[in-house]
Structure formats: structure tokens, C-alpha cells
Image (tube, rainbow, N blue to C red):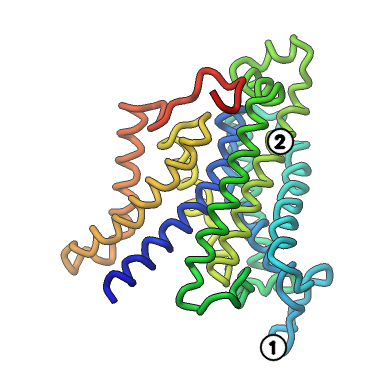
Amino acid sequence: MHIAGLSSYIVSLIIMAGIYAVLSLGLNIQWGYTGLFNIGIAGFFCIGAYTSAMITTPMPSGIYAKYVHQLFGLNLPFVFGLLGAAIAAGIIAFLIGIPTLRLRDDYLAIATLGIAETIRLIFNNEQWLANGPRGLMGLPQPLHSLVSERNYNYIYIIIVIVIMAIIYLAIEKAIRSPWGRVLRAIREDEGSASMSGKDVFNFKMQSFVFGCMVMGVGGALYAHYTRSITPTVFTPLYGTFIVWIMLMAGGSGNNKGAILGAFVIWGVWVGTKFMTDFLPPYLQSRAPYFRFLIIGIILEFILIYRPQGMIGEEKSVSKLME
């Protein structure tokens, strides 16, 4: 029984790490390869989660019929939820990118952070859209009828890993193409890329939209795993900054590093919860702050002694397989 409980816990850890790995891969497209300082990950995480939830659930009834999403409540399969999440995140990213991608890095960071909080507050305050602060519950899970409730995570871990692998291969293929080499050129020297005849703004927009679509898929995976979402989930800490730590720890500009960093940092985040259980009773209420402190120390250590991350950026990217 103890072994079964431990196995279930590890599977749950891997699922969440895999979801964060998808978010980290999306950020890597933007920051690791293009140099776009996006601090609004939580906003696209939120859009993906809510869009998939509203596409795959039926129209509300009873006491929940007070909120009505006219274009949603379609009760469609999980695959349509994933596609809808990616498309919605991509459309919003395109609209946001038009006024923001011409900004300098620090102003872009401020703008995207503010936009992400605005998105979260819209879902929180507009009751008619998605039930306001109470959120959405009872979200459907793919292939749920094949196994019992107790063993479902063993199905979902396969779904998450397969989707993560598909996204990884798609990004690798894109980055190792001429398109990806232009992104790196923009990151290294935007002026030189422009003088070489490249439409810098257009390539930035493509990178931004692509990365945000991946983040939207990560949001959809999260929503159907937890089966309930509220606006409080998509805060800057859990939706943005921890993803940045994962990417920097694993290795910015390396997709393998983005995945490795997600698994390592999420493992540390979960592991520190057990460490704080040994704190004296009068410090138990401050346990979350000790966890933040530990993560912060790890990040500082990496930035000082291993700034390239656990896996540094590859020097040669022309071939998919060497």
C-alpha cells in the first residue's frame, strides 16, 4: 500500500513537471532563441486553461446558469480543447504583440506582466464569462472511462509526455531551420539582422505567437489534470516566475535544458515541502516563505556558478540529428 501511494505521488509529480516543461519550452522560443523578455506567461497559461475548459464542458445549468458563455459550452472532445487553447492564446498574443513588440526589453517585460494580470482579473471579475472567482469545476478528462478514478493518472502521464515530446520535436525542427537561425540572429544583434534584409518585427511576432500557443497548450493540460480552475491559480509566482527559474536553471536556448529545468525545479519545489514539515511548530505558518527562499538561493547559485544552466546552449543547430 505504501509503495502504491509513493508510485501515485511520483506520477503526479511527473505530470505537473511535464506541464511546466511545456510552458518552459514556450518561453524558450521567445527568450532563449529570440531574446523577447516576456513576463506575461501566466496570462497565456490562463487563456489556454479557460479556453479548453469552456470548449470541452457543456453549457451551465441550474445555479451555475447565471453565467453564460455564448460561444463556448460546446462539450467537445479534449483534442478540440487543446487546439482551441493554442489558437486563442495565439490570437491574443498577436493582438498584444502589435503594440508591445517594438518596445525595449524592460518596457516589454512591464507591459506583458501588466497584460497577464489584466487577463487574470478579467476572468476573476467578469462573472458572465467563466463563473468569476469561483471558476470552473468538473472538467472532463480524456480516456477517463478506460480506467478507474484511482488509476487515471497513469493514463494522463502518457498524454502529457506524448504532447510534450511532440512540441519538443516541432520546436527542434523549427529552430534548426533557416527560420530559427534568423531568430538567433535577432537575439544576438537586431541591427545586423535588419541590415541583412530580415523583417525583425515580423520574426519577433512569429516567435511571440508560437511561444504563446505552446503556453496555451500547457494551460489546457493543467486544466484537465486538476479538473477545476480559478483565477487565483494564474498568479505571477506560479504562472510566470517559476517558469523563468526552470528555464534559467535548465539552460536558456536549449530545449533539452528547458525540459530538464522544469523537472528539477518542480522536484525541488515539491521536495522542499517535506523539508519544511520538520520546522518547529511556530515556524510552520511561514513554511511557504522558506520554500521561496530555497528556490531563490538555488537560482542565485546557478546564475553565479553556472549562468548557462545545467545544459548550455548548443553551438551548432543546423541539423536535427548529428
Residue at horizontal 18 percent and vertical 62 percent from the top: 279
Image coordinates of residue 289 in percent, x first then y, are 32, 55
Q: Foreground mark, 2 or 1?
A: 1
From this view, report whether residue 222 is shown above or below residue 127: above
Q: Describe the element under mark 2 as helix, strand or loop.
A: helix
From this view, report whether residue 29 is shown above or below residue 56: above
Q: Describe the element under mark 1 as helix, strand or loop.
A: helix
Query: Is the residue marked by circle 2 packed among few (<14), some (14-19), or many (20+) residues within 10 Å?
Result: some
Residue 63: assigned label: 1
Query: Which residue lies under the disc numbered 2?
Result: 100
First-in-chain label (2 vs 1): 1
The extreme bottom residue here reads 62
Name the residue nearer the viewer: 254 or 201.
254
Does residue 2 appear left or right of residue 106 in this picture?
Answer: left
Name the residue nearer the viewer: 133 or 64.
64
Q: CA distance from mark 2 to mark 1?
A: 41 Å
Image coordinates of residue 254 in percent, x first then y, are 51, 31
Residue at horizontal 33 percent and vertical 50 percent from the top: 268
